[in-house]
Image (cartoon, rainbow, N blue to C red):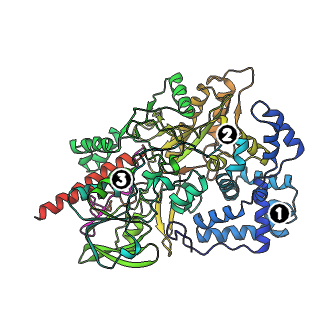
Amino acid sequence: MSADPFRFRVAAPIEFNENQLVTFKSILDTFVAPLSKEQEDALVLKLQKTHTEEEVRNYCQMTNSSLETLETIVGFINRAVLPEKRQQLLLMLSLLSTRAGTFALTGYFDEFKNLPLADKEKVFINWKNSFLPQLRLVYNTFHSLACHPAYAGHSDKLGIAMHYSNIVDAKYDNIPERLNMIQPEEITDDMYFDVVVVGSGAGGGVIAGTLAQAGKSVLVIEKGAYHHEDTFTTSEVKSFENLYENGGFTPSIDGNINVLAGSVFGGGTTVNWSASLKLQHFVREEWAKQGLSHFLSPKFAKDLDRVFERIGASTEGIVHNKSNQVLIDGCKALGYPVADIPQNTGGKPHECGFCFTGCKAGIKNGTMNSWLRDANENNAKFMEKTKVNRVLIKNGKAVGVECIAHYTRKVNIRANQVVVSAGALQSPGVLLRSGLKNKNIGRNLRLHPCSIAFGFFDRDIRTHEGSIMTAVSGVSENIDNEGYGVKLEVPCLHPGAFSTVIPWRSAANHKEMMMRYNRCTPILVLTRDKDSPATVRYDEKDNYIVDFSLSNHDTQSLLNGIERALNVLVAGGAREVLTGQLGVEPFVFREDEESRVDNPRFIEWKSEVLKYGLPQHGSAIFCAHQMGSNRMGISPKTSVAKPTGETWEVKDLFIGDASLFPTATGVNPMVTTETVALHVADSIINKNNSKL
């Protein structure tokens, strides 16, 4: 069993037979392959202004085998891939281990491992370009497995030619003191608290701090581990493993979207990119029209300000890195609206570039360094590495929780009230395991589906350095006149993530793109999803399963945003632009052409982008925001919780996280989650006071 058995997929480790393993290694070395002398020479010549010959030639010969990445890749499979999908992977490898199977899948009458490297490449290129989404999915799967763990886990070698380093020499002063966790020997059956809060993120942290300050005895239970600032690492692969659900990006059941969610003390606020945006007026109005009048009340407005004050959110101290500056410059050149994004750093500059691995400086005011500090100062207690199996219910009232303390021992903890704030992927599971039957549990999931447009420049960008996400454009935020559209922002892309979202068109092409990483600006296109069907459900081991399908409406939103992002990149000076679409080649300006959005060839190329669209498995779609799976409302027919956050079915059982949202927010949801959590905490206090 792994060290964190309930943060990763609960399943037996994958086992390859000899033939499957040989075939798998052959596939891995197709994606990260040794290049021919001719390919090497061409890249040496092409990159002579930016790279030494030694850098290029050494990198060109690196493979998954030479880097010994297999253990990292198998670890990724064991953490992130569902048991049934592992069986499908093994079946595919078995088929490719035989002549008949290889012929049926590829047209080559020999085992895959015996094919020349050029033919192996053709197999995956043909699958990439196939009209069958199932074959595109196979291509995507092997691309991700071959590249993400390799580049995330071995950037010390692969990063040399990328001009990337994750070594941070900075020394940080005034790091917050370590918080105390309840030790295993201190945990006993029938401990009692006024309130048990399940989860420590943007919802749970706020509720715990607020209730503790109101005099309640509070216990916060967190499934993930507590990491103090001095234990954070800048290793991409280790940070994903330590701080995220399933150790990183996890595909939905059909592979239509990859999902990233925090799983650590402090939740998503520990690993997010400091973006602190308030809920916009048109979303507040939409929620009020659904009967939730609180969102237009003076109290909600005051609570937004209260959150901003507590987390130190402001635009003071912002220093834009070069990618964010491209977004700003491109928007201004085109007349697009653009604004600074408030950062929860207390007005201090914060240019570490690694906040997705936890803030080593202790400057970012996630719940761990704000609301949970308030809770700690008011005698709240904290349990880490503890999974809540279910809420204990007696006579229709919550009376405590059953949990597995430190992943080893089942205990019951009594409480007068329970707040489930485990996040939109896990909170529905807690409710269902507790016996709740509301049909809306796990439904109405909203994900902010994202895509990326890339621009390559004739100057260094170094997108991994500096503050991560400091500017936003809402040029396409309301394309349907109903408040639905996209935001343009700059994402955090270190080598592992970058290697996967950049389409693989051949081993040589991919290695060239990776060596040009230093000159790339990515622009994130974040959709406020309106009607893409999405749910979260669970298998017999409590592994969460996301079902998702991108709707026509949200597809058009994304495409509109992609086109605007491409315009921004070109207006910002990009010499080459591309999307994550598998069937659209990059656009390159000729040497005698300026980078201009009115270039006829560029305009024609964009029409190809729009025509190709976003076919199933034809473009990288991912998300890092999850909302709405236990939404609040005015009727149990359409919602899971009352406007106060209390569930319709069980008294004194509250929900306190982004799963309460009636719809997607359209902005990074941390501030909204914390503000809604204040409302839930106040509802608990008011309910208790009314009983006196």
Q: Amino acid at mark 1?
A: Phe
Helix, strand or loop at mark 1 = helix
Rendered-image quadrant of the C terminus: bottom left
Residue name at image x 38 percent, y 65 percent: 181
* Mark linked to residue 70: none
Give the secondary structure at mark 2: helix
Residues at marks 1 and 2, CA–CA distance in whole angstroms:
31 Å
Q: Nearer the viewer, residue 423 or 205?
A: 205
The residue under label 1 is 112
Residue 661 bears which disc, if any?
3
Query: How far across and how far down the image is residue 228, in percent?
Result: 45, 56
From mark 1 to mark 3, how far is it between C-alphas?
A: 48 Å
Residue under circle 2? 517
Q: Quadrant of the N terminus?
A: bottom right
Disc nearer the start of the sequence (1/2): 1
User: Where is residue 621 shown, x and y percent of the image?
Assistant: 57, 49
How many labels sit on residues?
A: 3
How many other residues sit within 10 Å of disc 1, few (<14), some (14-19) or many (≥20)?
A: many
